[in-house]
Image: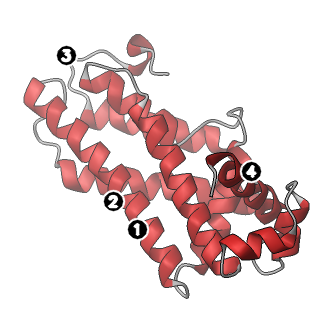
Amino acid sequence: MPEETTDELMHATYRALCKHGYASLTMRDIADESSKCKATLHYHFDGKRDLLVSFLEFLNERFTRKIAAIDADDPTTRLFALLDVACPDDEADDSDMFQTAMLELTAQAPYETGYRDRLREFETYLTGEFESVLRTGIDAGVFDDGVDPERTAEFLLTTINGTQTRRAAVGHDAAEMRQMIYDYVETTVVSDESPRRTEVHAE
């Protein structure tokens, strides 16, 4: 499938999923959000499940590109930049739609192996990024050497997931929880001699 067509269908899936929800979503709904007909979708995908597996792969690829684009040499700046990408603020472009789409598919993961596998890949990747920067920071002496990189990475991921779920499900203002995550990192992870977040200007 041409990349242009793939992008159009994935963005159409994004809009349709957020508009209709998983249970009511049909291939027709997705086609209506694009310039393609329903027959085109069925030509490229076996059905809704197959399309949504591809959609999760699309979201994962988009997320990993954002992580790869982080330009930070020191561990403190990189850690906060990772948090900014993983837990975007309420003003970030299409952030609400992204969280809604992920919540819809996460709710189906216990029943759909394809969804579960893609979500696990996403979590494994993000946890690995957190672990890597934490180990680098500890080795460099800018993070507290009493920090357990593996457990801290899992804690950050779990907290971020909870924040995103509350935001998408009940409209909770994520700003407060986001700040709590930053406060935790500053008081528990970053060593006393390292710059605070306000000094590193993470984007």
Which amino acid lies under the numbered mark 2 shown in the image of this protein?
A: Thr
Q: CA distance from mark 3 to mark 2?
A: 31 Å
The answer to whether residue 195 is visible is: yes
Please name the residue that numbered disc 4 is placed on.
Answer: 8
The outermost residue toward the right is 32
Please name the residue that numbered disc 2 is placed on.
Answer: 124
Mark 1 vs 2: CB contact within 8 A: yes
Mark 4 vs 3: CB contact within 8 A: no
In the rendering, which numbered label is found on residue 128? none
Lateral position of residue 7 relative to residue 125, left or right: right
Please name the residue that numbered disc 1 is placed on.
Answer: 120
Q: CA distance from mark 2 to mark 4?
A: 28 Å
Element class at badge 3: loop
Mark 4 vs 1: CB contact within 8 A: no
Q: Nearer the viewer, residue 83 or 171?
A: 83
Q: Nearer the viewer, residue 186 or 111?
A: 111
